[in-house]
Amino acid sequence: MGKHEIRLRRQRMSARGSDRYRNYNAVLKQHSNEKRFKQITRIFTFLLLIALVVIIFMAITRWEKKQSKPTSKVNNHLVVTGYSSWH
């Protein structure tokens, strides 16, 4: 075996999960904090997206109601006015 193969074999045998880092507890704590931050960010983004869809839906329904009401009032008014002017 060459020097390179011996070194790889030695690293493979001794390099287990916690042996890779001298401060494994700090790395684990940082990882859990980052994981929690990502989860909170994902939930917040999802809720914001739902709220945005609901607001857009409400705005469209109000706009449709607003558009349909004046046309019916104008038509009724014209029909009534036109009808009463004939008599």
Image (cartoon, rainbow, N blue to C red):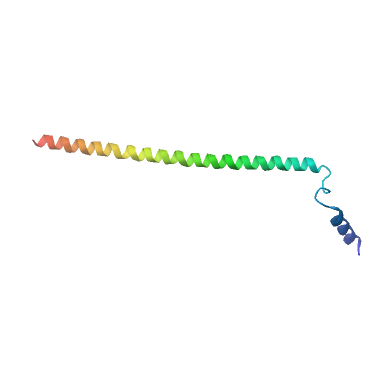
> Which image quadrant for residue 9?
bottom right
Look at 88% across and 56% down and name the residue there: 10
Q: Nearest the camera: 47 or 76?
A: 47
> Which image quadrant for residue 77?
top left
How far across and down, in percent of the image, does residue 83 sit? 13, 37
Look at 64% across and 42% down and name the residue there: 38
Is the C terminus in the top left, top right, bottom left or bottom right quadrant? top left
Position of residue 9 in the picture relative to residue 68 (left or right): right
Hey, which residue is sitting farthest bottom in the picture?
Answer: 1
How far across and down, in percent of the image, does residue 46 sit? 55, 42
Q: Is residue 20 above or below residue 29?
A: below
Position of residue 85 in the picture relative to residue 70 (left or right): left
Q: Is residue 9 above or below residue 21?
A: below
Hey, which residue is sitting farthest left in the picture?
Answer: 87
Position of residue 30 in the picture relative to residue 62 (left or right): right
Position of residue 25 in the picture relative to residue 41 (left or right): right
How far across and down, in percent of the image, does residue 31 sit? 72, 43
**How many numbered badges does the structure rendering display?**
0
Q: Is residue 52 above or below residue 15?
A: above
Q: Nearest the camera: 13 or 61?
A: 13
Look at 52% across and 42% down and name the residue there: 49
